[in-house]
Amino acid sequence: MTCGGTALVVVGGGAIWAMSSSKNDPPAKGDNSQYGMPTLPEDGPQRPDPDDDWNKKQQAIMNLMTVGGIVIATRYGTLNKMLPSGYQANHLNQDAAYRDVIPYNEGLANPLRGNPNIPDSPHAKFHQSLNRFWKPYQKGGAQFPDKPTNAQYGQALEEALKEAGLSPREAAEFANQARAQRNEYGLSESDKVPRVPGTPR
């Protein structure tokens, strides 16, 4: 199936990826910050990412999931197998909080460069933001032993995605898809999150 010269491919879990018809085709113009990659200029040559092999990795990342300008999350078990070295699939509904309800490989995910242990990488910034959100609910925090609601988590998720480099629109779209998955698994926005990461059961 094609759309404007781009092949649309349905992959595992029903997620839709947009793939260029040729490896030599230029990636779509726009903000690629959600992938931890530089924004492409409107015109002129592409600028290489100094930390990555641009020619190998940009194709794999740019193939990912935009349909009609909307970013589409896919399941962790699918995305994790498709990303090049240096990138990781990132659970939108954090596994440490939702693992008792949403199976690990079924959780919706987005790609982020780096990992939580690489300082200043997009993936590390995402988790640093969520860690600040969870801290008051952990032992010794002002809210302990209470738990936040799923709605509060959704707001924190959106903020964490923006801190990882996504645009406000992209962060909102991913957060909305994460909310829909929580609802799919029977979690209402007014419910408390299943678990607080870093807190014993």
Image (cartoon, rainbow, N blue to C red):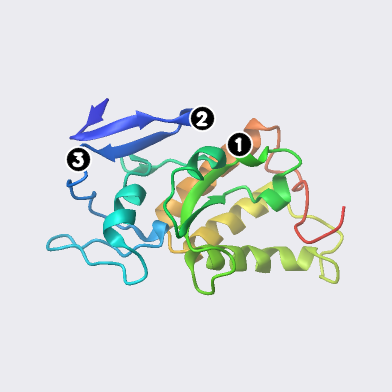
Mark 2 nearby-residue class (10 Å; few <14, some 14–19, many ≥20): few
For this view, does 3 lie left or right of residue 119?
A: left
Is the residue under label 2 in contact with that under label 1 (CB below 8 Å)? yes
Residue 199 visible in the displayed image: yes
Q: Where does the N terminus fall, quadrant-wise?
A: top left
Task: Tell me what residue is drawn at x 50 percent, y 73 percent.
Answer: 120
Q: Secondary structure at mark 1?
A: helix
Amino acid type of the residue tagged 2 in the rendering: Gly
Circle 3: residue type: Ser
Q: Amino acid at mark 1?
A: Glu
Classify 151 as above or below 54.
Answer: above
Q: Position of residue 67 (x, y in %)?
A: 33, 38
Residue 57 percent across, percent down from the top left:
34, 55
Element carrying mark 3: loop
Q: CA distance from mark 1 to mark 3?
A: 30 Å
Rendered location of residue 81, percent (x, y): 49, 43
Task: Kindly identify which residue carries mark 1.
Answer: 106
Element class at badge 2: helix
Mark positioned earlier in the residue sequence (2 or 3)? 2
Q: CA distance from mark 1 to mark 2?
A: 8 Å
146 to 101, vertically: above or below: below
Q: Quadrant of residue 45?
A: bottom left
Q: CA distance from mark 2 to mark 3?
A: 25 Å
Report the residue at 51% width, 58% height from top.
Answer: 161
Circle 3 Cα neighbour tier, 10 Å, few/some/many (<14 / 14–19 / ≥20): few
| Residue that carries the numbered disc 2 in the rendered image | 13
Q: Viewed as shown, does residue 190 lie left or right of 199?
A: left
Residue at which label 3 appears = 22
